[in-house]
Image: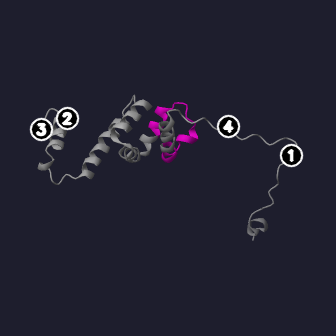
Amino acid sequence: MAMTSDGHTALSAILTHDGLFPRVKDKDLIAAAIKLASKQVTAAGLTSDDLLALKTALGADVFEKTLESLSPYHIKLLARRLDKDAPEIEVNTASSALSYVRQILSDGTPPAATEPPAEASPEAPAKKNKYLGRKAFRTGR
């Protein structure tokens, strides 16, 4: 059972009467802010404008730590939520998805899809690979 019916009141009391809480340091408050912000970031229906507003409210450093604290699943989910047409190569790992989210938030638009490399011209012969492997594999010894 909750001790107070309103969490805002409890947090405001801690922040207002910080003399009563000498063991609560800034790093503890930052950790609490990151935990609350990560809960908001993983919420459904979040848009890039909402993320930018959250970044402005928290500050860039705390917001960055919030993104880094997300699980790989949640950061991939966030990247997919922000850009439903994201190429699979951009969101298949957590680090690439985090980079993709940062790109979206930096300029407000998803990065343009990279075009596949052009096919080699039919006139140019394909290069032959002269490496046949180790000698033991070629001779059976």
Q: CA distance from mark 2 to mark 4?
A: 49 Å
User: Residue 114 occupies which quadrant of the picture?
Assistant: top right
Dot 2: what SS?
Answer: helix
Q: Nearer the viewer, mark 1 or mark 2?
A: 2
Residue nearer the viewer, 45 or 106: 106
| Magenta residues (range) | 76-97
Check disc 3 and report the residue beneath it. Answer: 3
Q: Are marks 4 and 3 in contact (CB under 8 Å)?
A: no
Magenta stretch: residue 88 in it?
Answer: yes
The colour scheme used here is one colour
Residue type indicated by callout 3? Met
- Residue type marked 2: His
The spot of residue 24 in percent (x, y) is: 19, 51
| Foreground label between 4 and 3 | 4
Mark positioned earlier in the residue sequence (2 or 3): 3
Earlier-in-chain disc, 1 versus 3: 3
Name the kind of residue labelled 1 in the image: Ala
Residue placed under numbered mark 2 in the picture: 8
Alpha-carbon distance for marks 4 and 1? 22 Å
Q: Which residue is mark 4?
A: 115
The amino acid type found where label 4 is placed reads Glu
Residue that carries the numbered disc 1 in the rendered image: 124
**N-term-proximal mark, 4 vs 1:** 4
Q: Whole-percent x and y of residue 14?
A: 16, 43
Q: Main secondary structure of the magenta part?
A: helix
Query: Which of label 4 and label 1 is nearer to you?
Result: 4
Element type where label 1 sits in the image: loop
Question: Disc 2 vs disc 3: Cβ atoms closer than 8 Å?
Answer: no
